[in-house]
């Protein structure tokens, strides 16, 4: 019986989505859960924003203990930076993505077939310098002509690729049609028997699961699926079918099916919570990770280590200030949570002169009108105003500040908690922004939740700008 490799695409697919995209922390948590589920390969998105994306890859590489981490390298690009980010992985894979159809070649890559073949050869050879595990993904393969697909397969294998994946991006094939396509490929390219070949199917016609099973029946050694519905085969459905009927077509997986339902439920809660946060506030809200509980017995190194897991890079002065504040709190409590450490860092780390100060703000929202915010900020030389619409008053206020400052940063986390009781309870808000591969946090305190949020956001923005202009 053949053991089929299962590759999960959840993190990669949700890295650049318009309607749903995971924050840095959420991607890390999803990768940890997939690792516990024993999927063979976890796909991440390619490194586009050098520092930030490299930090994510390095963080996942440290956190994942069993699975192989796969990261794409742009066709013709130098894989050195990607390989360096993956250097701490126990196992990693470099992926080369190439177009299989003439439409993709000419309209997306603006290249002819011969030029694409040369780029594939040099890209695979470049990746082989860093790892023995190199994959060629042939995009839109089902709409490519036989000669072109065979040329890509032959070229990649000769250059050292160990996995070839045929992608049905159109998702318009029925299982029988897809099986026939794969049969033709195996007959036309006998060298496929020397390596692992796999499939990736779009779920355009809700046939992705059936097409993947058809591929397994015809010799596929690896399949791509997703724990969260992202227009590809369902990890849960496919693995459940293999567990129940795999003996019929002679395949099995290493995925821990006994804990699958619970684990995929956790992953889906991350993704759904992210979508709900984006719908409510117009941004991707952070989800609290598993707590690293700290006590008064922990050293400054332990506290700094947990801060690093949260994404902070503290200088020597900040480390001392944060640790002193941590010890003051820890001496009064049994343990300190990561959220409490977040608040300490926001309050005591990197206190800078404010370039922008909040003068005033007005928000307007209702059941049948679009939320609006009018924000006034002051600098040393002038008074500035911004007016913006948004998905909720907080989102509108944040966008108004972006309008004034001319800067946009990824919102990594957003926390609100009441610190007093009663109708006039004070709210503490923590906002974490990610810029240039680092996390900056701001803290706001007010009896008005929107006011606390605006102050926290502006506090974090001032920290980023101070460091950028220093």
Image (cartoon, grey):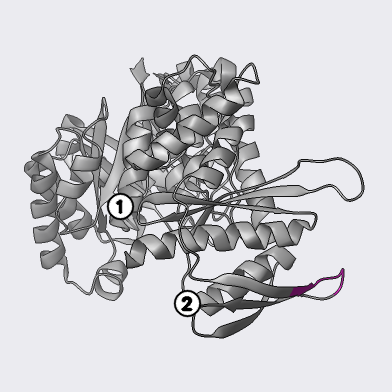
Residue at coordinates 51% horizontally, 44% vertically from top-left?
348
User: Mark on residue 51?
Assistant: 1
Q: Which residue carries the number 2 mark?
A: 406
Residue at coordinates 67% horizontally, 58% vertically from top-left?
453
Does 398 sit above or below residue 220? below
For this view, does 178 lie left or right of residue 346?
left
Which quarter of the rendered picture does the C terminus lie within?
bottom left
Secondary structure, mark 1, is helix
Q: Earlier in the sequence, mark 1 or mark 2?
A: 1
Of tags 1 and 2, the one toward the viewer is 2
For this view, does 178 lie left or right of residue 126?
right
Which quarter of the rendered picture does the N terminus lie within?
top left
Compute the Cα span from label 1 to label 2: 21 Å
Which of the 4 image quarters holds residue 224? Answer: top left
Q: What stretch of residues is rendered in magenta? A: 362-368
Q: Residue 468, percent across and down?
A: 35, 64
């Amino acid at each position: 019986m053949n053991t089929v490799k299962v590759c999960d695409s959840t993190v990669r697919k949700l890295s650049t989505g318009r309607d749903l995209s995971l924050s840095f922390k959420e991607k890390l948590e999803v990768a940890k859960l997939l690792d516990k589920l024993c999927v063979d390969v976890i796909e991440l998105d390619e490194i586009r924003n050098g520092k930030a994306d490299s930090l994510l890859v390095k963080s996942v590489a440290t956190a994942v203990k069993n699975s192989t981490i796969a990261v794409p390298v742009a066709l013709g690009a130098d894989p050195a930076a990607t390989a360096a980010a993956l250097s701490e992985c126990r196992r990693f894979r470099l992926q080369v993505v190439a177009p299989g159809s003439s439409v993709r070649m000419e309209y997306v890559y603006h290249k002819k077939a011969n030029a694409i073949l040369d780029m594939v050869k040099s890209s695979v050879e470049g990746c082989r310098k860093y790892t023995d595990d190199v994959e060629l993904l042939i995009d839109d393969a089902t709409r490519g002509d036989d000669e072109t697909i065979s040329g890509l397969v032959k070229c990649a294998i000769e250059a050292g690729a160990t996995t070839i994946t045929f992608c049905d991006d159109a998702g318009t094939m029925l299982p029988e049609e897809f099986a026939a396509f794969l049969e033709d490929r195996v007959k036309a390219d006998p060298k496929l028997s020397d390596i692992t070949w796999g499939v990736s199917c779009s779920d355009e016609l809700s046939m992705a699961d059936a097409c993947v099973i058809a591929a397994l029946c015809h010799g596929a050694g690896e399949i791509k699926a997703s724990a969260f519905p992202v227009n590809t085969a369902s990890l849960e459905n496919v693995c459940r079918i293999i567990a129940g009927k795999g003996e019929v077509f002679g395949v099995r997986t290493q995925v821990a099916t006994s804990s699958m339902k619970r684990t995929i439920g956790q992953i889906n809660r991350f993704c759904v919570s992210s979508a709900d946060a984006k719908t409510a506030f117009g941004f991707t809200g952070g989800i609290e990770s598993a707590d690293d509980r700290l006590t008064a017995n922990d050293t400054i190194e332990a506290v700094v280590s947990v801060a690093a897991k949260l994404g902070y890079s503290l200088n020597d002065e900040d480390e001392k200030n944060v640790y002193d504040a941590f010890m003051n709190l820890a001496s009064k409590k049994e343990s300190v949570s990561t959220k409490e450490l977040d608040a300490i860092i926001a309050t005591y780390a990197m206190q800078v002169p404010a370039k922008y100060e909040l003068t005033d703000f007005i928000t307007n929202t209702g059941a049948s009108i679009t939320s609006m915010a009018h924000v006034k900020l002051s600098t040393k030389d002038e008074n500035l105003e911004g007016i913006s619409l948004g998905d909720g008053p907080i989102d509108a206020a944040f966008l108004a500040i972006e309008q004034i400052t001319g800067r946009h940063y990824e919102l990594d986390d957003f926390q609100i908690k009441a610190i007093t009781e009663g109708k006039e309870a004070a709210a503490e808000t923590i906002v974490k922004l990610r810029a240039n591969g680092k996390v900056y946090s701001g803290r706001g305190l007010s009896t008005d939740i929107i006011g606390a949020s605006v102050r926290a956001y502006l506090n974090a923005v001032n920290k980023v700008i101070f460091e950028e202009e220093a």
